[in-house]
Image (tube, rainbow, N blue to C red):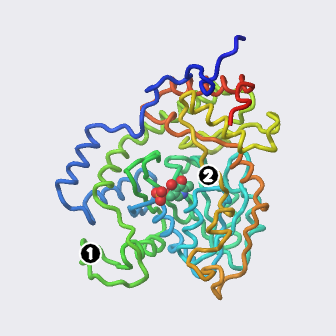
Amino acid sequence: MAKEKLAVVGGSRAVPKRMVRQWPPIDDRDQQMVLQSLLDGKHAFGPNCEAFQKEFAAWNGSRFAITTNSGTAALHMCLAASGCGAGDEVIVPAYSWSSSATCVLHHNAIPVFVDIDWDTMNLDADAVEQAITEKTRAIIVVHLHGLPADMETILAIAAKRGLKVIEDACQAHGATFAGRKVGTLGDCGAFSFNQNKCLCAGEGGMFVTDDEQVFRAAQSLWSFGETRTPLEDRDYHAYALGWMYRNSDLPAAFGRAQLQKLDGYLAQQRINAARLTECLADAPGVILPTEPAGRTHCWYNYTIRFEMDALGHSHDASAFRDRLVRAMQAEGVLTEVWQKTILPAMTVFQAKNAYGKGCPWQCPHSRPVEYRRDQYPVAQKHADWHTGMTTPLRSPNGPEVAEATAQAIRKIMENLDQLEGLE
Ligand SMILES: Cc1ncc(COP(=O)(O)O)c(C=O)c1O
């Protein structure tokens, strides 16, 4: 086979310029709904907020939903609503977005990290039990990159040990486990609607639950600790410690417009992911993401790992991965290394500097907890070996983008000698 010159060393790109279209696609309905909200002038407690909650709850199959100004706000509400508080321990996967763990600190509780499972990149359900102590109150499962965690095992452990299960579904809109959508499996869950998510409202989030008591508890910290909205004769009284986590009518209007297209987006994403998997099936040195039986991935992020042992780069995996990523980007592939640092290695946990003066770890209700980086070898290996793709799989991009992306990756992996000497 004739050698192809890689774009990173001056060859031509595998993915033509302007082929990959930006996310999210905006149509007349989005524009009309946002403009109407703007003109109506009911921005706080607006009608789109109310409608968005109802429509999202119906779409997800959840009994209750509360619209928030971020996924992190919804996660913090999950912590409070699950009864977690001072000194309680909450199990969190060692690899996720920072706020999957810092939401625990927000409520004065202590994150305890558990390593991830290599194949699914999710919480290693088999390692959860040994992290449980008499202080453990809840488990946060993150359906990372759109693949549901092993909910069967996790729910069984939680039931046996009397723990709450919080679903961080911020990346997993529409993903299912045993036919049920994420966010309906645990006690409560959180979704994010930020720019890059499968449902984009600009920013924003949603708290969901089926349990009325959990719903009321979450609602009480959502808006200054008040219990009544203007629709319920608001009395401007803080009944509990509250935050300002309400959404505004403008993003809610945008979210409602996008929600009507979400099933179509997810169907397209599935087609694109299947095509990418097909085209990369025998690409040398590439480990493809999996979709275990009984789970549907929503393909929020198509994350690949490079087979560093076989490539002879176990010793300098992250540096070599960075070179591969540069080569992919030069070919026109929109790819990004997501979290390079595993959660327990982040400064907030290493320095235990959350509220200052050792709080909340030195709270008299807490038990000493250690964050040793070497306790999470799988998460570290994943952090060093991976790169991910979101936009190339998103609507309005079709399988042609997946094909060009695969072609770029294959071209690089078949011409690795050209990366030698590259910084
Ligand atoms: C897994 C995960 N959890 C939580 C969040 C927080 O969501 P937000 O940015 O809306 O606060 C994000 C998104 O950034 C996420 O990817």
Per the model, the C-alpha gap separating discs 1 and 2 is 43 Å
Q: Is residue 339 visible?
A: yes
Residue 262 image label:
none
Q: Earlier in the sequence, mark 1 or mark 2?
A: 1
Residue in front for this viewpoint, 383 or 292: 383
Q: Quadrant of the C terminus?
A: top right
Q: Quadrant of the N terminus?
A: top right
The quarter holding residue 63 reads bottom left
From this view, report whether residue 386 is shown above or below residue 380: above
Can you name the residue that lies furthest to the top here? 2
x then y, percent, for residue 83: 55, 77
Three-letter code for the amino acid on which mark 1 is drawn: Glu
Question: Which callout, 1 or 2, points to the residue nearer the camera?
Answer: 2
x then y, percent, for residue 268: 48, 33
How many neighbours does mark 2 have within 10 angstroms: few (below 14), some (14-19), or many (20 or more)?
some
How many neighbours does mark 1 have within 10 angstroms: few (below 14), some (14-19), or many (20 or more)?
few
Residue in front for this viewpoint, 261 or 185: 261
From this view, report whether residue 420 is shown above or below residue 128: above
Three-letter code for the amino acid on which mark 2 is drawn: Gln
Callout count = 2
Q: Residue at x 38, y 40 (%)?
A: 261
The quarter holding residue 386 reads top right
x then y, percent, for residue 313: 79, 39
Q: Which residue is mark 1?
A: 232
The quarter holding residue 376 reads bottom right
Q: Residue at x 37, y 37 (%)?
A: 25
Residue in front for this viewpoint, 297 or 242: 242
Q: Which residue is mark 2?
A: 339
Label 2: state its secondary structure: loop
Q: Residue at x 70, y 11 (%)?
A: 2
